[in-house]
Image: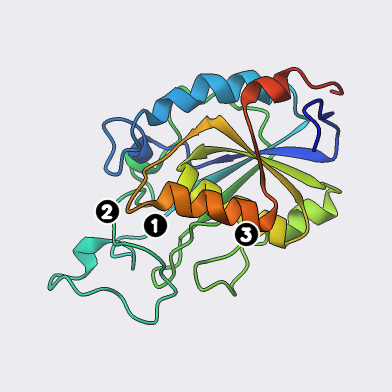
Amino acid sequence: MALGMEITSQDALVVVDVQNDFCPGGALAVPDGDAVIPVIHRIASRFEHILLTQDWHPPGHCSFASTYPEGRAAEGTGRDGPLWPDHCVQGTHGADFHPALGLTRAELVLRKGFRRELDSYSAFFENDRVTPTGLTGYCRERGLRRMFFAGLAYDFCVGFSAVDARRCGFETVVIRDACRAIDVNGSVRAMEAEFAREAVVVREAVVVMESGGL
């Protein structure tokens, strides 16, 4: 994909999980997580279509370490990866979008991880890799062909969403400096290897800002 990519009405900016609990002071804070917000605001002006995702867990969710008093991992829940502190619990301040995020033009808020027995990193599929969120159908019916991803965290929910977007047939770009990572046990390196395998393009925000089109 050339650096001079043209942003068109078939492109969407997908902003992943810029919520209080993933920002400094939150229950599962991504280092420097709120620093993505000014970058996202700058690039948002290039897009006609903006989609938001929101982690939205019930109390006692299968991904919470507190759900397993004896420290045992969940089995048969479709949960991938480590257990986490309680975060983004439905109706709490931590689950709200960060107050500095001002994307009032967003046309869709997709809530994920709301099933107690299933975690959901990806915006397209629950972690059982079978249960769809409905985002694929929405994007196809709206005639969207290319997804640009930003938000939190680069090596988990952003990355899984980008890989799934590619597998669903969308051209896919991750805007690296509009994301921040957790980097648990080499998760950044592993995700970037997955990007290479799936032909997910990684670019900086300046490439989007210098693009033609909208």
- Quarter of the rendering containing residue 52: top right
- Whether residue 76 is visible here, answered yes or no, is yes
Give the CA separation, mark 1 to mark 3. 16 Å
Q: Position of residue 96 (x, y in %)?
A: 42, 38
Question: What residue sits 46% from the left and 22% below the top?
Answer: 100
Left/right placement of residue 42 relative to residue 180 reads right
| Disc 1: which residue | 57
Q: Position of residue 63 (x, y in %)?
A: 33, 63
Are the two marked residues, 1 and 2, in contact with CB atoms closer than 8 angstroms? yes
72 above or below 4? below
Q: Nearer the viewer, mark 3 or mark 2?
A: 3
- Whether residue 156 is visible here, answered yes or no, is no
Mark 2: which secondary structure?
loop
| Disc 2: which residue | 86
Question: What residue sits 58% from the left and 26% below the top?
Answer: 40
Q: On residue 124, which mark appears?
A: 3
Q: Quadrant of the N terminus?
A: top right
Task: Name the residue type under label 1.
Answer: His
